[in-house]
Image (spheres, rainbow, N blue to C red):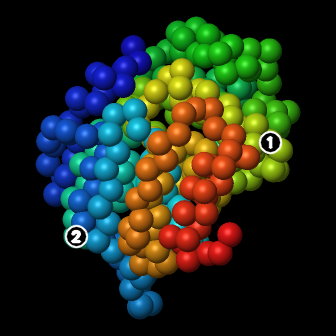
Amino acid sequence: MIETPLQASRAPGVDRAGHSEQVTAPVDIDRVSRTFKRGRQAAVQALADVSLQAGEGEIVAVVGPSGCGKSTLLELICGLQRPDPGVVRCAPAALMPQRDLLLPWASALDNAALALRAGGIGRERARELTRPWLERFGLAEFERTRPAELSGGMRQRVSFLRSLLAGKPVLALDEPFASLDAITRAEMQGWLDHALTAEPRTVVLVTHDVEEAVLLGDRVVVLSGRPGRVVASIEVGLARPRRRADPAVVALREQVLSALGVSG
């Protein structure tokens, strides 16, 4: 059985000491810093005193310069790293990395069903549960197709579906469309907006694309250069779907660029 967002939002989180505790918001990051030490090399601080929250069903887009700790932030949310210091309280999260990481020998159906298989569901039952989702995602006729024969946009849809079927209340999306051409990327942004409207999750979306952040996010959090610090949290407050040419979208894009210290 796949957890609903409501059921999963009540699941216990883990604080930085590894203690299970009840989560009041799906994502609650409190004054987190993260420093990496690599042997004899100088320590590198990726994040500094970062606080960030995401409510149930909220899409928070995170933008910032390269190397400012955005991917590290997602790994903290997913429990793949621990802060030092600070506290991370998050409901269970599924990470969708920048690369789709599909198994080249497996069909689209079996790649999408991997999340269910990892949860202990048998192969045939996992396929049965996944097929209706492939149809919803416009992939029904490609269920037996291997990744090498899929377009970039189709591969990303399979990857997103795999993350969704993990049944986690939080999705951590790391530059999901960075490898796509501009036209396909625009199509996928519209597709993701529609998918999350139909199947809401709490989402933390890392992106270098400021326009993408405004088109998809309910809120845009801006990080400084390394070490990443929150320099702005901008409410979007626009109805969906959003149009690139909408003056309100353009104005918000300029506001985010200004927070980044970039002239539009």
Q: Which residue is pictured at 62% across the width and 49% down the height?
A: 249
Q: Where is residue 4 shown, x and y percent of the image?
A: 37, 20
Q: Residue at x 58, y 32 (%)?
A: 240
* Dot label at residue 184: 1
For disc 2, the marked residue is 85
**From what the image shows, is residue 227 above or below residue 120?**
below
Q: Residue 263's quadrant in the figure? A: bottom right
Vertical relation: 137 (above or below) 21: above
Q: Is disc 2 placed on a helix, strand or loop?
A: loop
Q: Position of residue 95 (x, y in %)?
A: 48, 44
- Answer left or right for 153 relative to 23: right
User: What residue is at 46 percent from the left and 74 percent from the top?
Assistant: 224
Q: Residue at x 45, y 17 (%)?
A: 121
Query: Where residue 181 sits: x, y (%)?
Result: 82, 50
Q: Residues within 10 Å of mark 1 (few under 14, many from 20)?
A: some
Disc 2 marks a residue whose amino acid type is Pro
Mark 1 lies on a secondary structure that is: helix
Q: Mark 2 packing: few (<14 Cα in 10 Å), some, or many (20+)?
A: some
Q: Compared with residue 205, is residue 46 higher up or lower down, i.e. above or below?
A: below
Closest to the observer, 103 or 96:
96
Closer to the camera in the image, 25 or 145: 25
Front residue of 102/260: it is 260
